[in-house]
Amino acid sequence: MRPTVSMSDRWDPAAFKARVDGVLRNFLDEEAGHLVAVDTALAPVAGQLRNAAGHGKRLRAAFCYWGWRAAGQPDSDALVRAAAAMELVHAAAIVHDDLIDDSALRHGLPTTHVALEAVLARDGRRQAGTAARSLAMLVGDHLMALAGQLFTTSGLPAAYLARARDLWAALARELIAGECLEILHTGGRPDTATSLKVVRYKTAKYTVEHPLLIGGLLAGAPTTLRDTYTAYGLPLGEAFQLRDDLLGLFGDPERTGKAGLDDLRAQRPTALLAETWQAADASQRQRLRGVLGRGDLDGTHLREVRDLMVELKAPQRVERMIHDRVERATRALDDAGTPAPARRALRELAQQATDRIH
């Protein structure tokens, strides 16, 4: 028997985001208060902990929610709390990612380690940068621990939570594996297959597939439905990161909130760079070698690389990868006969995740 969802249900992304924002705000305010109660010197750390999950469209929470609803379960405040834990995983990953990449901006604001360095420098702290990076690492670690705390204290029955325990561990393991793979391949010879493997483990799984599966496991979804979640979630998660890579180089920093030169400066193993490298001749590769990994990159270098990528049609090939993956994801929903309200919501989320300008 297929799971059903009431046909009267309406998916209101703004209202859902407000619910998740409220959960995170209250939870992190309380935790920040606990830190400051230990010692007032921890106030800057508490402030960054509170701010870390203050942005985002709450896609990961939404996927967890619809993993639950598509399995026939009703709306639940306890489930929303559990789903909000997915956003703390993301916040932890962002703090660590910005630290690893030495990124200065996120959502148009100073990243955690940069903000902490400014506070420490203002207070006259020697070696403020080193101390700030150490503090940021600990903020990221604490956010990951808090994600587990919010999940397990969500109010869902212990028997429900037990169904998702193994997958929660896999989520953390595979996210870390993806980050490690990116570090290991940064600066190496660009290769599309390698880049796509990094994409899958660093982003795709914890952004779409794992939240969906966790929601489904909490709800007691049958194996066939969970297989549909994977068939939808993996290609869509890959498309999400491929879009992010395109925006990283071709997006407007005023809208993306990120520095456009970060990927080139770090020589990250993106599919966009790999597709450019594969299509380039010897002289064009030499031009790329002259730019990648430099610490003094400026707008002129960015324009040169963009022009070369366009000339070699690398962005068009990445766009095709995105399109093909979104089609594969939505087809999986149709082929499986997912309940209509869930199918509509998941189609809308697929568009929101990949048709974005920031």
Image: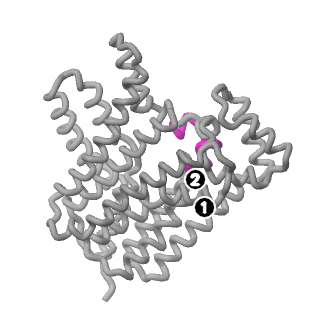
Magenta stretch? 244-257
Q: Nearer the viewer, residue 216 or 12?
A: 216
Q: Quadrant of residue 82?
A: bottom left
Q: Nearer the viewer, residue 207 or 140?
A: 140
Q: Nearer the viewer, residue 209 or 294?
A: 294
Does 351 appear above or below 260? below
User: What is the number of the mark on residue 221?
Assistant: none
Quick one: which residue is furthest to the top in this view?
124
Does 253 appear above or below 127? below
Q: Are marks 2 and 1 in contact (CB under 8 Å)?
A: yes
Point out the tag, 2 or 1, that comes first from the N-terminus: 2
Left or right of residue 60: residue 357: right
Q: Which residue is mark 1?
A: 322
Could you classify mark 1 by the number of other residues whose Cα lies within 10 Å: few (under 14), some (14-19), or many (20 or more)?
Answer: many
Please state the horizontal and vertical placement of residue 126, each as a whole percent of the image.
Answer: 38, 13
Q: Which residue is mark 2?
A: 243
Residue visible at 55% across and 66% down in the picture: 326
Q: Amino acid at mark 1?
A: Ile
Could you classify mark 2 by the number of other residues whose Cα lies within 10 Å: few (under 14), some (14-19), or many (20 or more)?
Answer: many
